[in-house]
Image (spheres, rainbow, N blue to C red):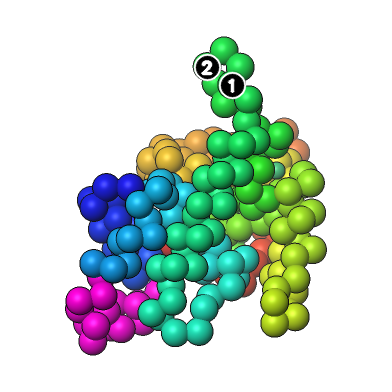
């Protein structure tokens, strides 16, 4: 990860955890040290780890000073799983599960936010084995993974963080219109929901 990537991750993470920025103001020298564990981490993996911390899938450490270490460690795991699992076929990466790329979580349009006129993402567990693992996870202090629905492509619209939000909004509007056209009286889009919302 370059210093620019690190700064981008830090801006992203401190938006999700505003306490981190306050903490850093009191310890301004520390930012240089935070970059160290990210040397062999990719930006996308670090952001994915931050999102897991937001949703509770990655345990938030006690004390903001511990965030960088915890994120970098999880990001290396994500990166390792991503690189280890896929086999390249015709130059394209192949995952055990193409839906979640073996992460176990799928970002989908949050129906409750949508009803309130906002376009946001929420995470659901993937329907695959990696989703089972995530759902059944137990943390070291004994608490269980967050309860959330399983991914169902007939009811949920999957979002891709690499794509532009405006393109995905348009694609979602088309998808929803098609669902309603093919299933008159279609209402189940709104029937799943989740407490955790992520800015999209
Ligand atoms: Zn999956």
In depth, the one of 8 and 28 nearer the eye is 28
Residue 58 inside the magenta-drawn segment:
no
**Eyeballing the image, is 106 above or below 183?**
below
Residue 120 lies left or right of residue 191; in this view the side is left
Q: Position of residue 157 (x, y in %)?
A: 61, 44
The majority secondary structure of the magenta stretch comes to: helix
Question: Are there few (<14), some (14-19), or many (20+) residues within 10 Å of tag 2?
Answer: few
- In the picture, residue 29 is in which quadrant? bottom left
Regarding residue 188, the answer to whether it shows in the image is no
In magenta, the rendered stretch is: 17-31
In depth, the one of 116 and 128 nearer the eye is 128
The quarter of the rendered structure image containing the C terminus is bottom left
Residue shown at 55%/21% (left/top)? Answer: 92
What residue would you read off at disc 2? 91
Q: Which mark is residue 123?
A: none
Q: Position of residue 162 (x, y in %)?
A: 43, 40
The residues tagged by marks 2 and 1 sit, at their Cα atoms, a distance apart of 5 Å
- Helix or strand or loop: what does disc 1 sit on? strand
Residue shown at 56%/49% (left/top)? Answer: 78
Residue 117 lies left or right of residue 153; in this view the side is left
- Helix or strand or loop: what does disc 2 sit on? loop
**Eyeballing the image, is 140 above or below 108?**
below
Residue shown at 65%/35% (left/top)? Answer: 85
Q: Position of residue 14 (x, y in %)?
A: 34, 70
Label 2 close to label 1 by CB (< 8 Å): yes
How many discs mark residues in the rendered view?
A: 2
| Ligand 1 image position (quadrant) | top right
CB at mark 1 closer than 8 A to ligand 1? no
What residue would you read off at disc 1? 88
- In the picture, residue 192 is in which quadrant? bottom right
Residue shown at 77%/44% (left/top)? Answer: 128
**Eyeballing the image, is 29 above or below 33?**
below
């Amino acid at each position: 990860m370059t210093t620019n990537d690190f700064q981008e991750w830090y801006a992203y993470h401190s938006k999700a955890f505003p306490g981190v920025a306050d903490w850093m103001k009191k310890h301004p020298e520390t930012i240089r040290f935070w970059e160290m564990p990210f040397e062999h981490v990719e930006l996308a993996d670090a952001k994915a780890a931050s999102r897991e911390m937001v949703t509770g899938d990655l345990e938030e450490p006690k004390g903001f000073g511990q965030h960088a270490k915890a994120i970098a460690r999880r990001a290396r795991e994500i990166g390792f799983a991503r690189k280890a699992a896929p086999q390249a076929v015709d130059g394209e990466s192949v995952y055990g599960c193409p839906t979640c790329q073996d992460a176990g979580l799928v970002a989908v349009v949050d129906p409750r936010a949508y009803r309130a006129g906002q376009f946001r993402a929420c995470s659901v567990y993937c329907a695959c084995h990696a989703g089972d693992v995530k759902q059944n996870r137990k943390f070291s202090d004994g608490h269980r993974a967050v309860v959330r629905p399983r991914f169902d492509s007939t009811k949920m619209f999957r979002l891709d963080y690499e794509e532009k939000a405006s393109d995905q909004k348009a694609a979602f509007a088309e998808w929803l219109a098609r669902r309603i056209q093919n299933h008159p009286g279609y209402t189940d889009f709104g029937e799943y929901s989740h407490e955790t919302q992520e800015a999209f």
